[in-house]
Amino acid sequence: MMTRDKRALDGVDEDIKDYIERQTQDNIDAGMAPEEARRQAMLKLGNVALVKEDTRAIWVSRRLDETRQDVRYALRAMRRTRGATIVGILIMALGIGANTAVFSVVHAVLLNPLPYPDPDRIVTLTYLSTGGNASGERSRQVSVPDFLDWQTQSASFDSMAYYTSGRTSVMAGSVAEYAVLTTVTEEFFRVFAGQPSVGRSFSREEAREGGAGAAMISDRYARQQFGEPARGLGRTLRLGNRSVRIVGVMPPAFDFPVATDVWFTAVGSRAQLHRRGNNFRAIARLKAGVSVEQAHTEMTGISERLGEQYPDTNKNVRVIVTPLQREMVGDVESMLYLLLGAVALVLLIACATMATLLLAKATARISEMSVRAALGASRSRIVKQMLVEASVQAVAAGTIGVLIAIWGTRTLVAFSPPDVPRLDEVAVNGSVLLFTLALCALVSFLFGLPPALQAARADVNEPLRLSTGRISGGGRSRTREGLVVAEIALAVVLVATSALLVRSLVALQQVPLGFQPANVLLMQATARPNGSDWSVSRAFFEGVLGDISQLPGVVAAGAMMGPPGNVESDSGYWVDRLPKESALSAARPAAMNVIAPGTFAALGIPIRQGRDFHDGDRGGRPQVVIINEALARAAFRERDPIGRVIIAGFDSMDPMTIVGVVGDVRQYGPAREPQPEIYMPYQQHFYNGATLFVVVRTATDPTALGPSIQRKARDRSPEVSVRLTTLDALLAEHVATPKFRAWLLSLFGAVALCLAMAGVYGVMSFVAGQRSKEIAVRMALGAGAGSVLWLVLNRGLKITAIGLTAGVLGALASTRLVSGMLFQVQPHDVVTYAGVVGALGLFSLLATYLPARRATRIDPLLALRQE
Amino acid sequence: MSTKAERDRIELLQGTLDLLILRTLRLGRTHGHAIAKAIERGSDDVLQVEQGSLYPALHRLMKRGWIAFDDGTSDNNRRAKFYYLTSKGRKQLAIETSRWDKLAGAIARILRPAAQE
């Protein structure tokens, strides 16, 4: 089509010329004079230009043709103002790209329904304390006796299940490896309406109390261990002392709880489980037609009844029903909404900047538009041309924006903290992309159009006459300055927020942890006992610690249950003797740890009083314990704790003698104050001494020693699963989220700052340009450079001052929203605000000064003659 | 420019120019001027190809695929397009001719009802 019409149109000129020549010849033959013959020939053909136009119109619709012309014209106009155009397109692209990237993540993580049938019917059941010191606190871990009561008494649910999940040692082949094992009850998969892709679900017989048990594995784990899913069926997994058959493989999309490798069902005896043994999580599927609120009401009634029935344990405990999706998102939600808010502000600033630049440009083009109108362009034609220009820019910006969106989404996923769920489902969201693109196009049209319209409407002579001499003023310049004020204000909000988050991050990273985290290698190892012979575990760790300390490059070695920063166990404790039965629940809590001799030294934790453990503190010898200073302060005040007796409800109620006091560490990461802690020798606490982190302080890079340390463990026993990490890496997870949001917000803040300054610069350049004639007159009349400089600066500073004031007020209101994310910094921190205002003021001054200085360099003669 | 008096000339009805061009090209390939001339001559100068209508009509027919052209050098050594009827155009000519006959007959019946009896 394209080629045919090109070919057909190609020779039209010559074809028509041929016609005229022939007709001229005919006329001459008929006796006309040559001049007259030619004139008559042309008359007969008709207006040549019109004929050509009409002929063209056969092939190309006129509208399309005009559009093509408009596009060409737009491209030419864009080339002419290359710098401004590139800036405009980049601003738009940035707005589109950044918003699409952030929203794509938010959509996949927060908004997209979970990939299960009727996902909104899947709920979690958690406790809420309604009295006592923990009032208002939610706790996700529930007890089995409570769960069983809920199950028998409730009518809202189709199916209910409880589960517990964790990394543990699993042997699929000849070597033990860590895998994420989720122990579930029979109805677990029915809650999700999930079917295995290969094999079958658990049978009732396998899942019953005291039954044989069975395992289902994830697609990923099946491929990893057996090559392909089907080959996993019928194989046996060794979980500690049990051997369990694999009966099914779940499809890749089924990933709950996140990263599970093996689902194992085997309900142990439920008889002696305690009502406050809160070690499980509960999920359920609502019956069709039952709302979350209805279920919630029913569960509230049940939990109140249980409170009356078991006041010791269940008083002040209610049950909350939460949709699973909300529960999974948890704390991530606030962070994602913060990012969304920040990026929306960036988009707003981008739009405002775009609008100011467009307004300036369009106003500068009023005379051009008037010329076009004077030459006969219709209003609709001028409007259309502006529309085409806006669209051409939007297409360019959209293309770059898509690239930014793709790259940005990938980057966000790659750098997001580990607790963000469902990241594998994140993909660039097409509808958001379209929405932001349309928004940007609309803004560019809205702000580009009115000046053009005005030009087309007004008396065509007036703007022509006024042209460059026109002093800017009136409504449009107020709009422009209003936009710049808004830009500065929004930038202050963003920059202030990011500054607060950065200061929090810095504070978080500078908190003294109480130990030396650098150059420490951690090797988690699970040495399962042989039947009831726990000496296997002890022998393994004793042996491997000896082996490792012989290695070159190892400074010191130890082992402990919970490495500092990642302590997970806590329990109540009593000093001197156990209280009476009724007061048992009033115990003060302490972190519980099991540790090997020499570990304090390896970690750099000082021993303040008494001694470290030694290999003589083993089974059969008097039970000993070491406490930290926080516990000494809490339980003993000024008195000497050494030699006193402590009892902890950890693994036994045996009294233990305090032999030492060590310095405090932040057990739960940098954000939480050190808590009281009790350390017990691993050789006296077999059960919790089977899984320990071997702690190795190295002379240089700890990861370099990893392979040889792992080999030492494997040499000792292939049945011990091991996993290597570093203490630094483990601690980094605590600051991963604050780091992520601080960095992103800083990035957005920086972008906002640049955009706002581009706006200030653009407007001030424009003002200076518009007033060049006025300035020239003043200078010709003897005004000095200083007063001219002040003339322009004055205006810019006023705008900046208003913007900064509005921004500070906005920031004061909005940083309150992030107060939960701040650490050791107040949301209205004066130093931060002063810094932000100072920095923005300075940048703004610079952005105003440059055009102002240019204005003083005007040659008055040139400027006046420019007309 | 032509021999007939102005008052005797009739402007072509909408659409009939296309038909006449097709009919003219049935005689063989030729250039634009010759087509116009043939129509005028063929009608004893009664029909006039309207100012500016020839080339749009030619291109309209080309777009529909009823005629095509070759680039050629005419007898006076100028580059010109030589138009010819395509097979599609030949069929269209037959259709258009019979349609014209029906139209002309129908109009004649209305204008001269007596002649029919």
Image (tube, coloured by chain):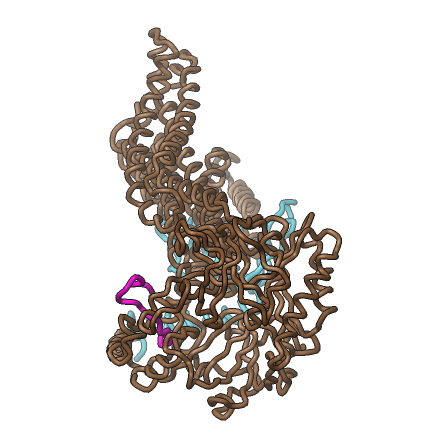
Q: Nearer the viewer, residue A551 or A470?
A: A551
| Rendered image quadrant of residue B115 | bottom left
| Residue at 39%, 47% in the rendered image | A822
| Residue at 51%, 73% in the rendered image | A253
The part of the chain drawn in magenta is A118-137
Q: Which chain is brown?
A: A
Q: Which chain is cyan?
A: B
Q: Is residue A120 magenta?
A: yes
In the rendered image, residue A675, in percent from the top left (x then y), is placed at 43, 55
In the rendered image, residue A64, in percent from the top left (x then y), is placed at 44, 51
- Above or below residue B72? Residue A657 is below
**Can see residue A544?**
yes
| Residue at 35%, 25% in the rendered image | A767
Name the image quarter holding the C terminus of chain A: top left
Name the image quarter holding the N terminus of chain A: bottom right
How many numbered dots are placed on residues in this image? 0
- Above or below residue B51? Residue A546 is below
Q: Residue furthest bottom?
A: A205
Q: Residue furthest front?
A: A643
In the rendered image, residue A275, in percent from the top left (x then y), is placed at 36, 78
From the viewer's perspective, is A426 left or right of A766?
A: right
From the viewer's perspective, is A369 left or right of A251?
A: left
Q: Is residue A822 magenta?
A: no
Q: Nearer the viewer, residue A705 or A638?
A: A638
- Above or below residue A663? Residue B92 is below
In the rendered image, residue B39, in percent from the top left (x then y), is placed at 48, 57
